[in-house]
Image (cartoon, rainbow, N blue to C red):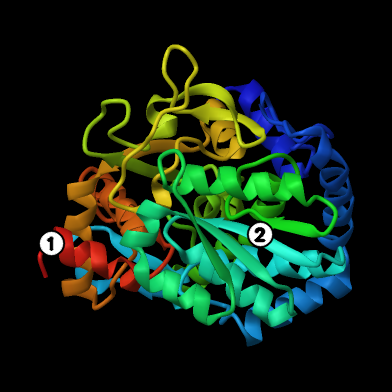
Amino acid sequence: MDEKNKQLLTQLLSGELPDEHGRFGEFGGQYAPETLMPALKNLDKKVKTLLNDSAFQQDLSEELNQWAGRPTGLTYAKKLTELWGVKVYLKREDLTHTGAHKINNALGQALIAKQLNAKRVVAETGAGQHGVASAAACARVGIPCVVYMGAVDIERQAPNVDRMRQLGAEVVPVTAGDQTLRAAVDEAFRDWVSNPDDTYYILGSVVGPHPYPYMVRELQSIIGKEAKDQIIKATNGLPDAVFACVGGGSNAIGIFHAFLGDESVELIGIEAGGRSQKLGDNAATLASGKPGILHGTYSMLLHDEDGLVQETHSVSAGLDYPGVGPEHAFLQSIGRVTYTSAEDDEALEEVRACCSMEGILPALESAHAFVGAKKWAEGNQGKTIIIGLSGRGDKDMPTLSKVLKI
């Protein structure tokens, strides 16, 4: 990393980025309909106040610890360690209430919505985990919740649809567009635009207009803070590398953020390589995307030469998105984080390996991180790594049963 990029990283770590316009370097910003601007400005002010308010942080911490199951464990994966030749530790977000990292963000935003006196909450979901987390968090704080979910994802994530309804949320099928996560975000935004005064939008990742990328990162940064303390206690030092899957990028930024200032720690994000490198066959935005605007932010996108955002494919519904958080685009641009991809078949193979060797069923999203870690291990024998296990794979059983013919 050259001196200019080191300076940019220092600005990020010191809190100078995002700037007053919500930008991480050239990425980010606030591109939204005029009707939403008052709500976004009000949210920005509230977020800055609450995230620095000791009483709010105490309430959030108590809820995370007593209700959501934090801190989560750091598991030493003995058999994967023997197989790969590197010391493998898993940061276990699958052990949280609702089964994934999504609860950290959903709970925090539900508490913010309550502070804003919201009458209802809308959310989007792909794999269903953010929808479940939002439904649970809204039930906890007492606000009605509507979740938009693509019809394709409803079919492949049926268990989570049932869970959301049991938790009291209304699940609205989205039959427009690609009928996956992108379309669900579109519909949630439309709802919010139509009801900006009494509705709060719990956005599920580090995407969208400012202050969402910043706010969601702050709420998810607990993952990396815990992991850093835990690995130091376990090994008396820092890891050599940290791996996480990247769709929109909330679990990845959550675990990476605590290590950004540690030059000795490699940070590697793994996107969905899908079926092939052909446009439309994957969701590897950072690997093959171009800059553009989607869902209120300027970041890397998968679009064609005419600027039309393309449909994506991944066996994992949570990674099936044509954009990525602007902070990830920034971290790639300055060379602090490396982004690679893993194809569907590779991810499915690592689901099987983790199940049979460690007795843990990882989410299909998380399995992509295992692929990247396994490849990295081939040239780094004896080193120590952390893999962000972003969620459990119970939700993926319909897909796994169909694809793997279990």
* Residue drawn where x is 33% and y is 73% of the image: 394
Find the distance from the CA under tag 1 to the CA under tag 2: 34 Å
Residue 122, which numbered label? Answer: 2
Query: Residue 61: percent from the left, percent from the top?
Result: 72, 76
State the residue lying farthest toward the left: 405
Q: Is residue 386 visible?
A: no
* Residue drawn where x is 37% and y is 38% of the image: 283
Horizontal side of 225 relative to 246 (left or right) equals right
The C terminus: image quadrant: bottom left
Quarter-wise, where is residue 105 in the image?
bottom right
Identity, as a three-letter code, of the amino acid under mark 1: Leu
What element does badge 1 sit on?
A: loop
Q: Nearer the viewer, mark 1 or mark 2?
A: 2
Residue 377 lies, with reference to residue 55, above or below; the image says above
The N terminus: image quadrant: top right
Horizontal side of 17 relative to 3 (left or right) equals right
* Residue drawn where x is 44% and y is 69% of the image: 161
What element does badge 2 sit on?
A: strand
Query: Is tag 1's residue or tag 2's residue first in the polypeptide sequence?
Result: 2
State the residue lying farthest toward the bottom: 66
Please state which of residues 335 and 95 is positioned toward the viewer in this rendering.
Answer: 95
Horizontal side of 190 relative to 359 (left or right) equals right
Quarter-wise, where is residue 38 in the image?
top right
Query: Residue 371: percent from the left, percent from the top?
Result: 26, 50
Please rate how many residues cluster around mark 1, counting C-alpha atoms within 10 Å: few if below 14, some from 14 to 19, many from 20: few
* Residue drawn where x is 26% and y is 70% of the image: 397
Please rate how many residues cluster around mark 2, counting C-alpha atoms within 10 Å: few if below 14, some from 14 to 19, many from 20: many
Q: Is residue 378 visible?
A: yes
Query: Residue 34: percent from the left, percent from the top?
Result: 82, 33
Dot 1 corresponds to which residue? 404
Identity, as a three-letter code, of the amino acid under mark 2: Val
Labelled pair 1, 2 in contact (Cβ < 8 Å): no
